[in-house]
Image (spheres, rainbow, N blue to C red):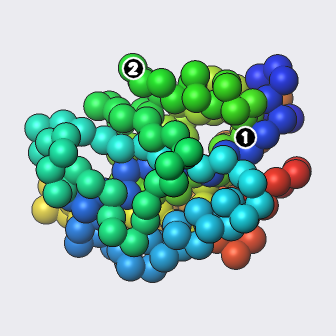
Amino acid sequence: MTTLDNRPNTALLVVDVQNGVVEGAHRRDVVVANVAGLVERARTEGVPVVWVQHSDEELTRGSEDWRIVAELAPGDREPLVEKCYGDAFEDTTLETVLSELGVGRLVVAGAETDACIRSTLHGAFTRGYDVTLVGDAHTAGDKTAWGAPTPAQVIAHTNLYWSFQTAPGRRAGVTETKDVVLGGTP
């Protein structure tokens, strides 16, 4: 249903599951395990896995904090998109990668819910993609010291509002890892 022409394919988009991003994050091990399960399913089903990796002053390219967590490893043929902004589409090769793969639908998992996940969800949706958020495969760190809600509340709120997103000719939604449909119609 995507508004992008000739883009019948789905891709799993794994956002910023990096040591320095998910260290101490809410339900870190469960989320990383869910992401790992999705990656394996995608590979088995022949669905492209596209990795996104953030760098900035705190996540210096090449540092241990910048590296993708040990439990996950991009395959040799799986695209890895480096970014410096919250939205994985901003000033990156992501759109080109997805276009070359014929992707019009994204299944999104990763971190951080209240930053890069939200930005990328909205960035994809406004660019014409159908976007499914995996509700139990994204996480955030605790920012309550700065007045933010707890990570559990941030995640629950993001799942709630993303399940009601609408736009002409596009689909948005939230599903749990066990219910993710990678190929075909969601």
The local secondary structure at tag 2 comes to: loop
Give the amino acid at mark 2: Asp
Q: Is residue 69 above or below residue 60?
A: below
In screen coordinates, is 22 left or right of 176?
A: left
Give the amino acid at mark 1: Arg
At 48% from the left edge and 76% from the top edge, which residue is drawn? 33
* Sequence-earlier tag: 2 or 1: 2
At 23% from the left edge and 50% from the top edge, which residue is drawn? 66
Q: Is residue 62 above or below residue 97?
A: below
Label 1 Cα crowd, 10 Å radius (few <14 / some 14-19 / many 20+): many
The residue to which callout 2 is attached is 91
- The image shows residue 81 at horizontal and vertical percentages of 43, 36
Question: Residue 70's image quarter?
Answer: bottom left
In screen coordinates, is 26 left or right of 130?
A: left
Q: Is residue 51 above or below residue 140?
A: above
In screen coordinates, is 42 left or right of 120?
A: right
Q: Nearer the viewer, residue 116 or 143?
A: 116
- The image shows residue 133 at horizontal and vertical percentages of 61, 54
Q: Nearer the viewer, residue 164 or 34?
A: 34
The numbered dot on residue 105 is 1
Label 2 Cα crowd, 10 Å radius (few <14 / some 14-19 / many 20+): few
- The image shows residue 163 at horizontal and vertical percentages of 67, 54
- The image shows residue 49 at horizontal and vertical percentages of 59, 50
The local secondary structure at tag 1 comes to: strand
In screen coordinates, is 130 left or right of 72?
A: right
At 51% from the left edge and 54% from the top edge, which residue is drawn? 75
Question: Residue 82's image quarter?
Answer: top left
The numbered dot on residue 161 is none
At 78% from the left edge and 40% from the top edge, which residue is drawn? 9
Q: Quadrant of the C terminus?
A: bottom right
